[in-house]
Amino acid sequence: MEFQFIYHNEMHFFGVKKVWIDSYNKVPCSDLEKTMIDCLYMPAYAGGIIEVAKALWTAREKLDYGKLLSYAKQFDSQVVIKRLGYLLDKLGIETIINAINN
């Protein structure tokens, strides 16, 4: 399997949790919301914006929209916020409105 390393600004490293990979080892892995933000930032590395939209739709009931919004703000990229808003609107996912109002 071929890998390509993607370099990020240090401020983009957050939203990580430890995940068991076997009975003895845990590794750091981004949580669902941070993974979505990373995919919105560089959709080409996630299969393209259509695949990101499919992933957002598939995960719509599992996502913590308050955390997703917080991560989008913390990531500090207008392109991420615009893509997120556009996809949520086009997919008819209105849960983000509740996160904003709370």
Image (spheres, rainbow, N blue to C red):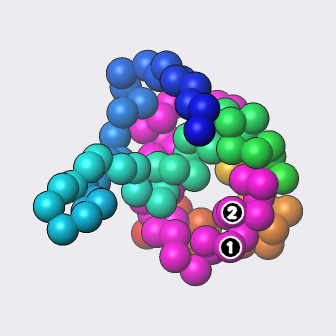
Mark 1 and mark 2 residues within 8 Å of each other at the beta carbon: yes
State which region is magenta.
Answer: 51-79
> Along the horizontal axis of the image, is 92 left or right of 27?
right
Circle 2 crowding by C-alpha within 10 Å: few under 14, some 14–19, many from 20 = some
Q: Amino acid at mark 1?
A: Thr
Image spot of residue 43 (x, y percent): 72, 39
Image spot of residue 5 (x, y percent): 52, 24
Is residue 64 shown in magenta? yes
> Along the horizontal axis of the image, is 40 left or right of 73?
right
Q: Which mark is residue 55?
A: 2
Q: Secondary structure at mark 2?
A: helix
Is residue 58 shown in magenta? yes
> Along the horizontal axis of the image, is 12 left or right of 37?
left
Eyeballing the image, is 28 above or below 90?
A: above
Count of picture labels: 2
> Along the horizontal axis of the image, is 52 left or right of 30?
right
Question: Which image quadrant is residue 92 in?
Answer: bottom right
Q: Amino acid at mark 2?
A: Ala
Give the residue at x 58% y 80%.
61
As measured in the structure, the alpha-carbon distance from the residue carrying label 1 to the one carrying label 2 is 5 Å
Residue 19 visible somewhere in the drawing: yes
Depth order, front residue of 68/5: 5
Eyeballing the image, is 65 above or below 16?
A: below
Quadrant for the N terminus in the image: top right
Q: Secondary structure at mark 1?
A: helix
Circle 1 crowding by C-alpha within 10 Å: few under 14, some 14–19, many from 20 = few
Q: Residue furthest front?
A: 1
Question: Which image quadrant is residue 78 in?
Answer: top right
Residue marked by disc 1? 58
Image spot of residue 6 (x, y percent): 54, 24
Q: Which mark is residue 95?
A: none
